[in-house]
Amino acid sequence: MVIGGTVGQRRSPSWWNLAPLVAGAFVVAVEGTVLTGVLPQLSRDLATSVSATGQALATYPLGYVVGAPLLAVFVGGRSQRNVCAAGLLIFAVGNLVSASSGSLVTLMAGRLISALGACVFIPNASARAVALGTRRRGRALSVMASGFTAATLVGAPLGVYTAALVGWRAVLVVVAAAAVLACLAQRLGSLGDNQVSGMTTRARLRFLGDRRLLSILVLTVVVVGGEFVVYAYISPLVDHQLVVADGTIATAIMLFGAGSTAGTLLGGFLVDRFGWSRVLTVSVVAIGTTLLVLPLAHNLVFLCACLMTWGLFGWTFTPAQSNRLLAVLPDNGAMVLTLNSSAVQLGVAGGGLLGGVAIDLWSPAVLPFVGAGLVWVSFVAVVASRRGAGVVTGDGPPPCRD
């Protein structure tokens, strides 16, 4: 979908105008990272295996994949400010359903509702952020993505600690309340508002046939899938390699979040400075290498160094891919961001499901090798895209800085 006519008076936006949207992204990301961090506790409370619970959590990204393109049609012609508010409220309801769950079925239902809210909020919030201007596009998307990485840096460790004290259900209730506050903040914020112009389902299907678009989205799915084969089961993996307590797992996740936050913010500046192609290539190589080294990390310092490196380069991949889409398909900004978000969530779901199968067949020790294999396969696509004659390229000269 593309951004249509302006609603209300346009202003020259500042970085501070993005704060409510970043807060919303933070809240949305906290839920998933907290549940990943307390996966063993969650499986015990619901009397299921770790692999079954991890695969049940994949309901969220699968719901996102299906819901994002369908709901994009429904919200066409509506105010993006109102759409973002509605998404956060739906997300809050989903968290309350998950918090009340006594079985995997109810947990999956709550995660599905949360996913529908997230897939309404995230793409439209990102599209609103791009209003800061083309020359600041990379940095604006990185600032938006910093909400997700901050959730890993601060929200996930805090949630894991809190869940150990009062339980994961109480944490989800707090997340729901925070989503309502973020909804009010962005609703009352001063960032300009746009209408979401509608695109018919038939037009979307034609657009999805674009080879350039498909090649980019497939790369997103494969790389993110490789990462989430490992990250979806980071708690049992860390426990397997170090045999540690919940506090150490929370610390490891926090350090991964520190690297992710730095990578997200740095990625936008690097893309604006050097172009998406160089950043993308370095990112994929670094992710694949770090995952191969991870099984050798049998002491806490080495493991944390690997997680920080992985977080740093793993999250430069996201702004590089977003800018690549906007460079190659500049006339369909909000729609390509929606599709890329769906591709990310498809990778998250696929990685979670594949990781669960790997644990059932072997053990957590094989997860980094499976994930690295997927990432290195994707590297072939990155190299091919750089050699292609305009099929998936579109870097061009770096834009001038503001």
Image (tube, helix red, strand yellow):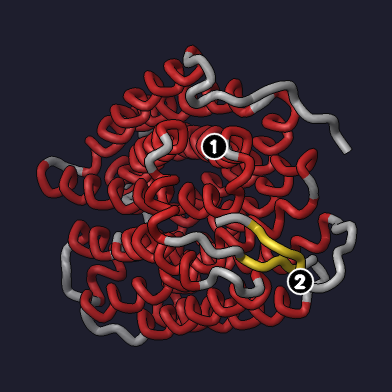
- The residue pinned by badge 1 equals 321
Q: Contact (CB < 8 A) between labels 2 and 1?
A: no
- The residue pinned by badge 2 equals 7
Farthest residue to the top: give it: 387
The residue under the point 53% across, 35% down is 317
Q: Which amino acid does label 2 sit on?
A: Val
Q: Which amino acid does label 1 sit on?
A: Gln
- Sequence-first disc among 2 and 1: 2
Foreground residue among 398 and 105? 398
Residue 308 shows in the view: no
The residue under the point 61% across, 49% down is 333
Residue 44 shows in the view: yes
Which callout, 2 or 1, points to the residue nearer the camera? Answer: 2
Q: Would you call the spot at circle 2 few (<14 residues within 10 Å), some (14-19), or many (20 or more)?
A: some
Horizontally, is 47 left or right of 367 in the view?
left
Of the 4 image quadrants, the one containing the N terminus is bottom right
The picture places residue 213, in percent across and down from the top left corner, at: 45, 37
Foreground residue among 181 and 191? 191
Of the 4 image quadrants, the one containing the C terminus is top right
Where disc 2 sits, the SS reads strand
Cα distance in 3D space between marks 2 and 1: 29 Å
The residue under the point 57% across, 44% down is 260
Q: Residue 118 carries which label?
A: none
Foreground residue among 216 and 138? 216
The residue under the point 63% across, 62% down is 125
The picture places residue 27, in percent across and down from the top left corner, at: 57, 68
Horizontally, is 11 left or right of 184 in the view?
right
Farthest residue to the left: give it: 361
